[in-house]
Amino acid sequence: MTYSKVLTTAALTAALALGAILPTGAASAAELTEDNSYRFAGSDRYQTSLEVSQDWPDNSVETVVVATGGDFPDALAATPLAGAYYSPLLLTKKDSLPTGFAAELKRLGAKKVILVGGTGAISEKVQKEISALKINVERINGKTRYETAVNIAEEVGMGDTLYVATGANFADSLSVSPAAGYYADPILLVPASGAVPTVVADYIKANQPEWPIIVGGEGAVGPAVEDLFVDPIRIAGKTRYETNKEFNEFALEFGFIENQSETFIATGANYPDALSGSALAASYGGALVLTAKTPSEASKQQIQNFETPDSFYTILGGEGAVSSETLKQLFAK
């Protein structure tokens, strides 16, 4: 396993103190059975989101985080916010609440809802619909997706780790979302090329983390970002699936994944199911494995490397997202 920068001695010492280990592969091939797996699937992305939310007990979430299911930019940095409030990440339509949404807020015991994104993502009409349920509503947004992510980071607060991913696509930020959500560590977004937005650069300069983690190659996150940190770590693969694998192996090795036995599987071709599922994965301290319709070797290797005697696999989305045939290939011996 290689990363673009050598980790510092302090970082290695910290990892050893956590008792982290490098995944070495399972003694036998991982198997998917009815006893060690569960699929969350609804009729669409919104209903799948509500299905995932059912994992949280009744009256257990006072503050619920809500993002748009219509497009990914504002939603990419939302999982750490959900993690900070021990909340599911519910998806809404732009101009109306999905069927069952209001009932789920009531079941969760919500007293406050935080909408992620501006009115172009979640309209004032939706905000009023939630307010009519006698629930306080706040909104975190910015003029751009980059400013929205910074404002989320301000709400979450700065810890030991800060993630930076491209705001031009969703896969890399989804890969880090479970770890970021578990520890409530912010995710910042940057353009794939050109200057780092001033609002992002200013935040980084004012909040130097112990673990600055850049996810994606220089084609996704340009080298200018590295100059903003003292000793950044870049984790990247040739494809989104290889980057996903590289990050998950890094996260397991250095203690960013707390529960090796909990593996969440989602399509890497679209974001909604993985986004909803990332908050659930964060609540369990598990990893999110992204897969294509025909699984890559990187995805297959993760399934084998993460296997334990107690492994449990959560599939996010229906047959149209992660088919039975895809799973068969993913777990093939």
Image (cartoon, rainbow, N blue to C red):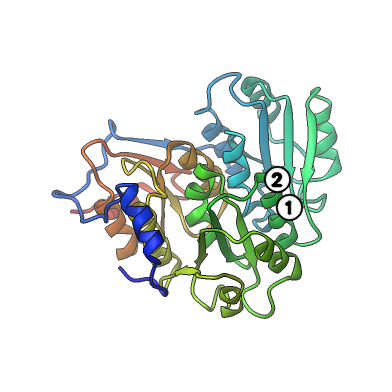
Where residue 47 appears, x then y in whole percent? 59, 36
Q: CA distance from mark 1 to mark 2?
A: 6 Å
The answer to whether any part of residue 293 appears in the image is: no
Please identify the quadrant where the N terminus is shown. bottom left
Residue type, label 1: Asn
State the residue at coordinates (51%, 58%).
210
Dot 1 crowding, Cα within 10 Å, few <14, some 14–19, many 20+: many
Residue type, label 2: Glu
Check if mark 1's residue and mark 2's residue have beta carbons within 8 Å: yes
The answer to whether any part of residue 291 appears in the image is: yes
Query: Which one is nearer the viewer's eye here, 290 or 86?
Result: 86
Q: Secondary structure at mark 2?
A: helix
- Tell me if residue 268 comes above or below residue 81 in the rendering: below
State the residue at coordinates (81%, 22%).
134
Query: Which one is nearer the viewer's eye here, 196 or 18?
Result: 18
State the residue at coordinates (61%, 78%).
224
Where residue 51 appears, x then y in whole percent? 53, 32
Q: Which residue is mark 1?
A: 151
Where residue 31 appears, x then y in whole percent? 22, 43
Disc number at residue 28?
A: none
Where residue 43 appears, x then y in whole percent? 56, 38
Disc number at residue 155?
A: 2
Please identify the quadrant where the C terminus is shown. bottom left
State the residue at coordinates (64%, 63%).
189
- Tell me if residue 195 comes above or below residue 294 in the rendering: below
